[in-house]
Image (cartoon, rainbow, N blue to C red):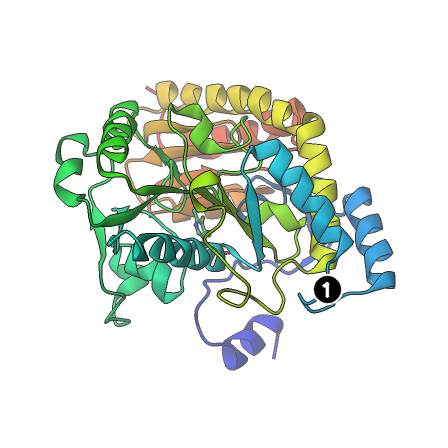
């Protein structure tokens, strides 16, 4: 059996794997078993912010794994402390809890919201249509897309999903019983859809009036990708809780919940916890990630993002019958097509560039933050060629 037959035989069929067998990565490139090179423009779906085989990450992992790969959370751990300090100082939040993944960060944030609401007779958690917050029951309870939810109910009570960007009707879904609103300011899996300024304005007004917590899901958009440390910083509002994951562990599983003053004293010993969350090797790698991002890569994300978006907008002008809209901030960009994107993605891949298709019709680009102008030119050249063959220019 070849590797794909073995995969099919042994694994639950949850993933639609790409027809590639990757051997190794270096910088923004992946290499398959035959040595063919691919320019990776989706970077492990926003995980590989420093690209592949980053020397600082490798060094930190080696150094820490020779000391200890795990202590229980009974122990204070220096790598956790160092990363926590960087995250707190950079974000301006007051407290942190480390997790292993995005969905665990969401679950933890929902638990904090419920605990906070418990003393205030506030039980409800509200999120928005077309969002993605993870695969565990809490996360699924605040999502609406059938592909993720069908067959898994019943879900958590007192959770509801309002219409994303429907400022006019936002008030209807919220009340004094609302403990928290969970929002992806720039929807990722949903097709790189930013929240509107009008919606944020209305949310702010209602937050002041009704007194709920705002939880920003920055799992995909956070840690410098959009050119600001958090995606919400493109808008005029301050969340009480931010959840992160994806790039923060330098490719190792790590996430975190950051909380502001309103929730700083909610948790006491024993009420929440994790065996692996805040793994010291992942935190050591994360410290390198933070230093690189705040030391220049966030700025690079901003400038390269402008360039990448301008290339995508050129496609929109040139191929109006194919490209409907271009959306995004920094190195989180989406190009919405007038048709399903899978065949385009395969054709682009065959020519050595990896892009992702999400929500059927959106080509999503989440390149490593180390990407340069040359990489963007290379990707745009190949994408442009494939688009031209698919739809004749206007
Ligand atoms: N929230 C957002 C915005 C995400 O993009 C993701 C993953 O894609 C998650 C939550 C879930 O994260 P994880 O897959 O690490 O559980």
Given residues 369 and 89, the one toward you in this image is 89
Picture coordinates of residue 197 (x, y %)?
30, 23
**Residue visible at 62% across and 40% down in the picture:** 87
Picture coordinates of residue 255 (x, y %)?
56, 53
Given residues 149 and 60, the one toward you in this image is 60
Rendered view: 256 above or below 392: below
Residue 287, by quadrant, is top right
Q: Quadrant of the N terminus?
A: bottom right
Picture coordinates of residue 347 (x, y %)?
48, 44
Within 10 Å of disc 1 (Cα), the crowding (few <14, some 14-19, many 20+) is few
**Residue visible at 15% across and 37% down in the picture:** 171
Q: Is residue 128 left or right of 170 when viewed as pictured?
A: right
**Residue visible at 23% across and 71% down in the picture:** 154
Q: How many marks?
A: 1
Rendered view: 350 above or below 275: above
Q: Is residue 56 visible?
A: yes
Question: SS at mark 1?
Answer: loop
Rendered view: 318 above or below 278: above
Q: Is residue 224 visible?
A: no
């Amino acid at each position: 059996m070849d590797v794909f037959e073995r995969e099919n035989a042994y694994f639950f069929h949850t993933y639609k794997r790409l027809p590639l067998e990757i051997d190794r990565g270096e910088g923004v490139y992946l290499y398959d078993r035959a040595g063919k090179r691919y320019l990776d423009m989706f970077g492990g779906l926003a995980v590989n912010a420093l690209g592949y085989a980053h020397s600082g990450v490798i060094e930190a992992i080696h150094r820490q794994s020779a000391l200890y790969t795990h202590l229980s959370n009974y122990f204070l751990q220096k790598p956790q402390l160092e990363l926590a300090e960087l995250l707190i100082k950079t974000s301006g939040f007051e407290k942190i809890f480390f997790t292993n993944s995005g969905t665990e960060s969401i679950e933890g944030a929902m638990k904090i919201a419920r605990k906070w609401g418990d003393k205030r007779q506030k039980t409800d958690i509200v999120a928005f249509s077309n969002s993605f917050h993870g695969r565990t029951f809490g996360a699924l309870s605040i999502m609406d897309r059938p592909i993720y939810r069908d067959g898994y109910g019943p879900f958590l009570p007192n959770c509801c999903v309002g219409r994303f960007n429907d400022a006019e009707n936002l008030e209807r879904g919220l009340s004094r019983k609302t403990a928290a609103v969970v929002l992806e300011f720039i929807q990722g899996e949903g097709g790189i859809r930013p929240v509107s300024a009008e919606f944020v304005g209305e949310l702010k007004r209602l937050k002041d009036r009704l007194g709920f917590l705002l939880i920003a899901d920055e799992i995909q958009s956070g840690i410098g990708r959009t050119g600001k440390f958090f995606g919400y910083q493109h808008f005029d509002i301050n969340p009480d809780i931010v959840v992160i994951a994806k790039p923060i562990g330098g490719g190792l599983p790590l996430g975190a919940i950051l909380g502001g003053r309103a929730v700083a004293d909610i948790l006491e010993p024993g009420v929440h916890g994790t065996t692996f969350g805040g793994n010291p090797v992942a935190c050591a790698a994360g410290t390198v990630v933070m230093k690189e991002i705040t030391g220049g890569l966030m700025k690079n994300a901003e400038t390269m993002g402008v360039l990448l978006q301008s290339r995508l907008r050129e496609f929109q002008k040139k191929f109006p019958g194919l490209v409907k809209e271009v959306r995004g901030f920094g190195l989180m960009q989406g190009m919405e097509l007038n048709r399903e994107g899978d065949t385009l993605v395969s054709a682009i891949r065959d020519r050595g560039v990896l892009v992702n298709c999400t929500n059927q019709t959106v080509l999503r680009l989440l390149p490593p933050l180390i990407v340069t102008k040359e990489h963007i030119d290379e990707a745009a050249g190949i994408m442009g060629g494939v688009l031209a063959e698919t739809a004749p220019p206007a």
